[in-house]
Amino acid sequence: MFFEHTTADLFFYYSFNFIAHMKKIVLGLFLITGLTAATIAQNSEGRIIPSVDVKTIDGKTFNTGKIANDGKPMIIDFWATWCKPCKKELDAISEVYADWQKETGVKLIAISIDEARSSAKVGPDAKTHGWNYEIYIDENSDFKRAMNVGEVVPHVFIVNGKGEIVWHHEGFVDGGEDHIYEILKKVAAGEKITE
Amino acid sequence: MRKIYLKSITLTAFITAVLYSNSSVAQLNLNPNNLNLGEVHGNFEANAQYYIPDSTIGAAEVPEKMLVNGYANIIYTKGKFTAGIRYESYLNGLQGYPSGFKGTGIPYRFATYKADELEVTVGSFYEQFGNGLTIRCYEQRSLGLDNALDGIRLKYKPFKGVYLKGLVGKQRSFFTTGPGLVRGFDGEIQLNEAFAKLADKKTVITLGGSFVSKFQTDADPTLVLPQNVGNSAGRFSITRNNFQMNGEYAYKINDPSQDNGFNYKYGDAILLQANYAVKGFAISLNGSRIDNMSFRSDRTAQLTNLLINYVPALSKQHTYSLLAFYPYASQARGEIEYSTEVKYKIKKETALGGKYGTEITINYSGANSLDTTRIKGEDRGHLGYTSNYLGVGKEVYFRDLYIEITKKINKTWKGSLIYAHQIYNKSIIQKPGSPSIHSNIVVADITYKLKPTSALRLELQNLQTKQDHQDWAYVLLEYTINENWFIAAGDQYNYGNEHVKERYHYYLVNVGYAKKANRITLSYGKQREGIFCVGGVCRNVPASNGFSLSITSSF
């Protein structure tokens, strides 16, 4: 609405055909600039964690830009209290979490995408399951969107010591935690993840 | 529409400028490590369906034969700057999807600049204040709901622990925006962060307040309608050790609309939630009272269109198909809702706990009408009714008693057993004049692990009711071949239908492939006509028969 009544506005008002062409050009330009940027961004191993406000279980605001683990790897796991495979995955990791921490120094950050409807159950759920994770609530999916998580949860990301996202995976099958561990060991050893 | 083009042009110009400014630097310094042109990421989703008519189950003929919904998000980030677009295509929109989704376009595009204390967003954005009682803009793609705002939003942190947000915009309605303006302000103070004295206290307190106003011109020939309608709310959250409590109260001035039959009564809502949790045990209590709280940026909008606020349903969210057969949706017109949940994990190495422990969940939730009295005789204020604040209406909207036991027996076997009893007031939730449905549901979910990443999973479900279409059975067998491949086959069978001829089978076969963040699912089968709800919003899905293909990918 900040374009209201400008000369450009009037110009475009009378040239709809031109606009139709412009639309394609604009989209093309956007994609080209985007792709160029993507190619050049290959220098780093992956993108850094976007900074978005989420909530802690006790209702404080927390910015995801502050997610860190002293130069050691991290797992970011998107889940919900109503999502069975998500809880299976977090349970499976929980059983071996102490070993993983000892081997790789990893920290798991569990991001619940529960809405206001069920977000009050996130803390109780995590406690009854005995999860020793860092837990945040992303009630309106702001972090989920910024991380490009689609309609499927669980969605797991592995972040290297430099804070770069080097691997991600959608969905969980029984035993899937072993694969996560393989990747994690490589990341902890400073190896590049190619898959 | 021209505004959309203009904005995208401006956006592109901005990005190009940012990129060029860097390229010139790059020419001076050819060390590739110093090159930082930012990053591009995104995701893609496409759902296609090929329809085969089937008159027995009521699957109508689709003239196009095949319908496809597609979405692509592209987000560009460079330091403190982020911009993004979403391309959407409905060629044509899938059956049962709101019919306004037609054609292609870029209905979502934004640019955000974030400097430590200040964040500015122009273009499309999603937002929620508190629990959403005053405003919640979000995307629920499965329902065809997207009420994103198009406008300006500022977020500002003037002091430690103080968070302010202000916004103005118009809401998305398919490929255009609705007629109303939405303005909002939200403030929150986290006391322990704001006051150094409280920093180490065990009690953590956060207070907040919001105000949202909508403007829509009054062109009604007979009624004098309020053009500006304000909705304000206050909230708190207290945590101490294992105990937590939060609540919110919202008050909306008179807001005559199609949803409330153009009454001039104020609206209000209260939501209270408390829980206590320790390792292995948790109890939570939730309650709400909603009265005339429908709030849309167009008085005549219906279904999922132009909703400004969000009234959370408190009932348990189910994922097993027969448990979610009759789903509750919160009633913004008026309701009293409550939910209690107890979770208990029986310890490992005990008689009942076994080697791995046993988890028990009991949930009881319900909703009733408000205790209202219709105004008899002259109702000069067009208020319609009065409601007794502390009373509970007699009409049952919903009940759900849910008991679940989950147990891992050994390394190869694990499973869940669920019993639920539900009462569903179809007349209120779905279709006036329908009977209330009382159902008993049993679910068994058993997993047998074959190899480290290969498993068989069997779901057995049974729903028994004397109303609606009577009894149903559901069997699903899922075979996870390895981490990448799965195959599943299921049949939903209306074996108890009193009309013997209508005892249909709804079978479905799925094959899925997933690797990293790419997922492809192909399925063939029949889908029964049903209602699909999330929160307070529902979508009717018509019966269908045919192939469907779904592809998701993120990069």
Image (tube, rainbow, N blue to C red):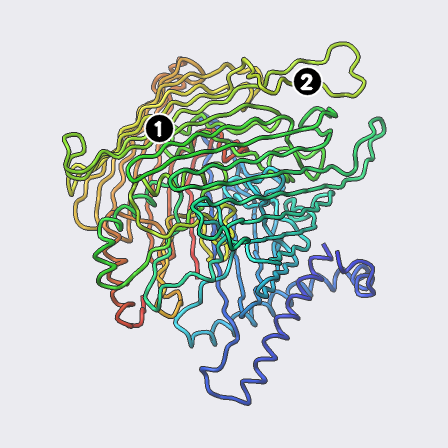
Asked whether the residues under marks 2 and 1 belong to the same chain, the reply is yes
Q: Where does residue A155 sit, x and y in percent of width and height?
A: 38, 52
Label 1: chain? B
Q: Quadrant of the N terminus of chain B?
A: bottom right
The residue shown at (17%, 45%) is B450
Q: Amino acid at mark 2?
A: Thr
The residue shown at (61%, 74%) is B18
The residue shown at (47%, 51%) is B46
Name the one closer to the observer, B159 or A175: B159
Furthest toward the right, the residue is B221
Label 2: chain? B
Of labels 2 and 1, earlier in sequence is 2
**Mark 2 lies on residue:** B386
Q: Is residue B278 above or below residue B339?
A: below
Name the one closer to the observer, B428 or B80: B80
- Mark 2 secondary-structure assignment: strand
Q: Amino acid at mark 1?
A: Gln
**Mark 1 lies on residue:** B492
Q: Quadrant of the C terminus of chain B?
A: bottom left
Is B205 positioned to the left or the right of B445 in the image?
right
Q: Where does residue B6 sit, x and y in percent of width and height?
A: 71, 62
- Mark 1 secondary-structure assignment: strand
Mark 2 against mark 1, which lies toward the viewer? 2
Q: Where does residue B516 sit, x and y in percent of width and height?
A: 34, 58
